[in-house]
Amino acid sequence: MSASWRSWLSEDAAAAIRLAAERAHPNETGGVLVGVHSAGRPWITQAIELTTSHPRPRFYEPPKGSRQAAVRRAARHDRRLGYLGEWHSHPIDVPPSLTDIDTVKLLAATGDCPRPVLLIARRTANGYALDARQWSGRSLRQLRVVCAGPLPTGERPAGGTRLTRRSHA
């Protein structure tokens, strides 16, 4: 895996995903990934759960219109935040399905995020493991996830890396 294929993920977002997956088990749950791009890489600061009224063990689909509304709410609290991709749980330890791959392709083609992240919480013997991938334009590429804290309060994090806002989904 190339070092350039990595993402930062806040501890709060990782904890939110794992907690939501545990609560929903044996059904799938999911939502949106919100954050910024820093040095050209996604920095996921929030994982917002979008609960469905019809939870199922082998399928998750967010309620219509909920993705955009969640991103707008997050951006109201911090104007730097924007849509970075999707997350959902798999109640068993399996990689992205063909449906997952097709969904990411569609999001890339029709949304404001040409390289969305797909993060799957896969149930293992030790709880939920996080499997992050990013659309390259041709395929889903594995991401090395680096644990990070929240965004700094100023416009630039330590080291002067520029933060760029992602568009709304």
Image (cartoon, rainbow, N blue to C red):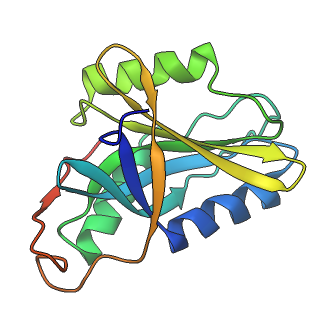
Q: Quadrant of residue 37?
A: bottom left
The mark total stands at: 0
- In the image: residue 68, left or right of residue 10: left
Against 129, is 94 above or below? above
Please tell me which residue lies in front, 126 or 115: 126
Query: In the visual, does 147 lie left or right of 109?
Result: right
Q: At which x and y percent is residue 19?
A: 72, 65
99 relative to 72 in the view: left or right: right
Q: Tell me if residue 153 comes above or below residue 157 in the rendering.
A: below
Q: Find the residue positioned furthest to the bottom.
A: 153
Residue at x 54%, y 44% (from the top left corner): 87
Question: Which image quarter holds the C terminus?
Answer: top left
**Residue at (37%, 57%) from the top-left corner?**
34
Q: In what quadrant of the picture does the N terminus appear? A: top left
Question: Between 39 and 168, which is closer to the camera in this rendering?
Answer: 39
Residue 125, horizontal then vertical, whole percent: 90, 49
**Closest to the observer, 153 or 72:** 153
- x, y (%) of residue 128? 75, 53
